[in-house]
Amino acid sequence: MAKHNLKMTPGKMSAQSVHAALGLYKKNPQPHWSCVVLEVSDKKFEEAVVAHPDCYVVTDAGYTEVPAGTQTCLAFYEEDPPALLFLRNSVHRGRASRS
């Protein structure tokens, strides 16, 4: 998942999304997984963190587009089927609900 209000460039959002996917995989490798890319509100982002306590959250270092300590993206595995979910504005053609 990626916070849509941060207004990161497509390149920055791509990098943050990959950090989330790889961070989760390094934390908990799975033999088979797929990616779903979405964009969400801060509220949905925080709900996902609570709902998936084993998720991997990317906290930016603050060298380029967002302040240091900003949580930008997260990744988590679904229960069934195993899938890696993370959000990225520039990859997904649709958008997640922002409510």
Image (spheres, rainbow, N blue to C red):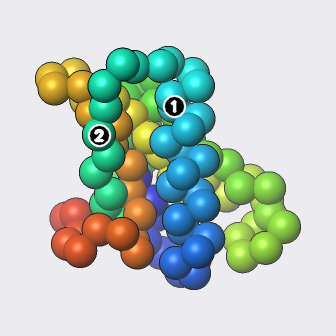
The amino acid type, in three-letter code, at marker 1 is Leu
**49 to 18, vertically: above or below:** above
The disc, 2 or 1, on the residue closer to the chain's N-terminal end is: 1
Crowdedness near tag 2: few (<14), some (14–19) or many (≥20) residues, C-alpha within 10 Å: few
The residue positioned 44% from the left and 59% from the top of the image is: 2
Query: Where residue 20 appears, x then y in whole percent?
Result: 54, 44
Question: What SS does tag 1 mark?
Answer: helix
The label nearer to you, 2 versus 1, is: 2
The residue positioned 67% from the left and 49% from the top of the image is: 59
The single residue placed furthest to the left in the displayed view is 80
Question: What SS does tag 2 mark?
Answer: loop
The residue positioned 76% from the left and 67% from the top of the image is: 67
**64 to 74, vertically: above or below:** below
The single residue placed furthest to the front in the displayed view is 31
Residue 40: in sight, yes or no?
A: no
Residue that numbered label 1 is attached to: 24
Which corner quadrant of the image does residue 88 belong to?
A: bottom left
Query: Where residue 9 appears, x then y in whole percent?
Result: 57, 81
The amino acid type, in three-letter code, at marker 2 is Ser
Q: Nearer the viewer, residue 47 or 3?
A: 3
Quadrant housing the C terminus: bottom left
The residue positioned 36% from the left and 19% from the top of the image is: 31
The single residue placed furthest to the right in the displayed view is 63
Residue that numbered label 2 is attached to: 34
Q: CA distance from mark 2 to mark 1?
A: 12 Å
Say whether residue 74 is left or right of residue 44. Answer: right
Label 2 with label 1: CB-CB less than 8 Å:
no
Total count of labels: 2
